[in-house]
């Protein structure tokens, strides 16, 4: 059951979502925009996974608000993509701050910690990858999206993956094609993940070959925020059964405007907390051998 929504598919979408975090060094005005992400797959039984929100960037800072989240693996308590939460990015310190408006709390973390927090399975799923190939190229001719002239880039990924959690195992050939459409008039919407955050997505797989190739491929992409991203993916199991899915991310209503500095500050009265999974990782690091049975008993328990 835990593998019914493939972990790799959620992880593959994270770099695309990360592109929404922008910074505008030296800009006198900021940019606001809306975004949506929809994932459909053969096993979805007609229930799409969706996410929507609003982004704002100005003066080297960014803010992403989540207004609609219908993606179970991203709604874990304490997660950054829960409704009523938003993420702040501080370019000066490369710091990500997750703000929980319901609990009036916030947490601060670096890129790797943020990537790990997005997957409830990060610490309990064992992944083995072989036959990895990741690359990216410019696609001609370019096209128009929402009246914006865009540059079209395509990233392809193929690999063989074995996953296991407790007594559940799966083995698949994975293939995905990601099409990105960048509007050059918004080139100042720079992605802070581009230099090192793409390698952070390798944290989900813990595979050096995949991480290296992903980083090299991402360096060929346009260094901005795509107004449209479409990812088609297929997994084929050992019996030859193929399952396909599509994730579409759309950035709309891009507007240049003055954005108050307070937009990127933590509200007064909010208290700092340690996210559940960061706390769990610290406990695991300090755990004594006689706690092994207790940890095994709580294998499928997500900290609350």
Image (cartoon, rainbow, N blue to C red):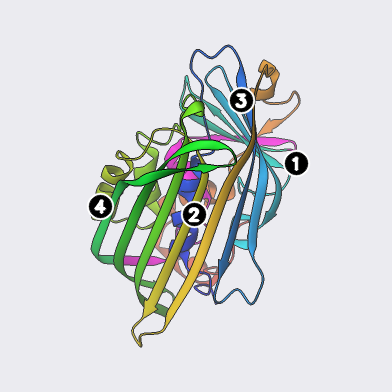
* Number of other residues with Cα within 10 Å of mark 4, as a class: few under 14, some 14 to 19, many 20 or more: few
Whole-angstrom CA distance, mark 1 to mark 3, is 28 Å
Query: Residue 237's spot in the image, x, y percent?
Result: 37, 81
Q: Earlier in the sequence, mark 4 or mark 2?
A: 4
Which label sits on residue 31? 3
Q: Secondary structure at mark 4?
A: helix
Mark in the foreground, 4 or 1? 4
Whole-angstrom CA distance, mark 4 to mark 2, is 26 Å
Please say if the residues under marks 3 and 2 sit with CB atoms less than 8 Å apart.
Answer: no
Please say if the residues under marks 3 and 4 sit with CB atoms less than 8 Å apart.
Answer: no
The residue to which callout 1 is attached is: 103
Which label sits on residue 208? 4
Quarter of the image where the C terminus is located: bottom right
Query: Residue 79's spot in the image, x, y percent?
Result: 61, 49
The residue to which callout 2 is attached is: 230
* Number of other residues with Cα within 10 Å of mark 2, as a class: few under 14, some 14 to 19, many 20 or more: many
Q: Secondary structure at mark 2?
A: strand
Whole-angstrom CA distance, mark 2 to mark 1, is 34 Å
């Amino acid at each position: 059951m835990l593998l019914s929504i493939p972990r790799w598919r959620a992880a593959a979408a994270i770099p695309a979502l990360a592109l929404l975090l922008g910074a505008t060094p030296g800009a006198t005005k900021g940019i606001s925009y809306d975004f949506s992400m929809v994932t459909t797959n053969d096993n979805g039984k007609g229930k799409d996974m969706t996410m929507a929100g609003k982004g704002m960037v100005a003066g080297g800072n960014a803010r992403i608000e989540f207004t609609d989240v219908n993606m179970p693996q991203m709604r874990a308590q304490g997660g950054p993509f829960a409704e009523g939460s938003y993420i702040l990015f501080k370019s000066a310190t490369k710091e990500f701050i997750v703000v929980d408006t319901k609990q009036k709390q916030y947490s601060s973390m670096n890129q790797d910690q943020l990537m790990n927090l997005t997957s409830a399975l990060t610490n309990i799923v064992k992944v083995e990858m072989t036959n990895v190939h990741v690359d990216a190229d410019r696609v001609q001719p370019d096209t128009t999206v929402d009246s914006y002239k865009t540059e079209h880039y395509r990233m392809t990924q193929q690999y063989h993956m074995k996953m296991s959690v407790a007594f559940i195992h799966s083995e698949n050939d994975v293939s995905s094609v990601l099409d990105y459409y960048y509007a050059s008039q918004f080139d100042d919407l720079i992605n802070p993940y581009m230099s090192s955050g793409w390698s952070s997505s390798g944290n989900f797989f813990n595979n050096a070959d995949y991480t290296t190739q992903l980083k090299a491929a991402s360096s060929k992409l346009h260094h901005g925020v795509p107004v449209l991203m479409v990812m088609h993916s297929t997994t084929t199991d050992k019996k030859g059964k193929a399952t396909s899915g599509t994730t579409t991310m759309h950035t709309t209503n891009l507007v240049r405007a003055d954005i108050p500095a307070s937009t990127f500050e933590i509200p007064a009265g909010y208290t700092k907390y340690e996210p559940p999974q960061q706390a769990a990782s610290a406990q695991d690091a300090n755990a004594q051998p006689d706690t092994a049975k207790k940890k095994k008993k709580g294998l499928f328990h997500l900290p609350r």
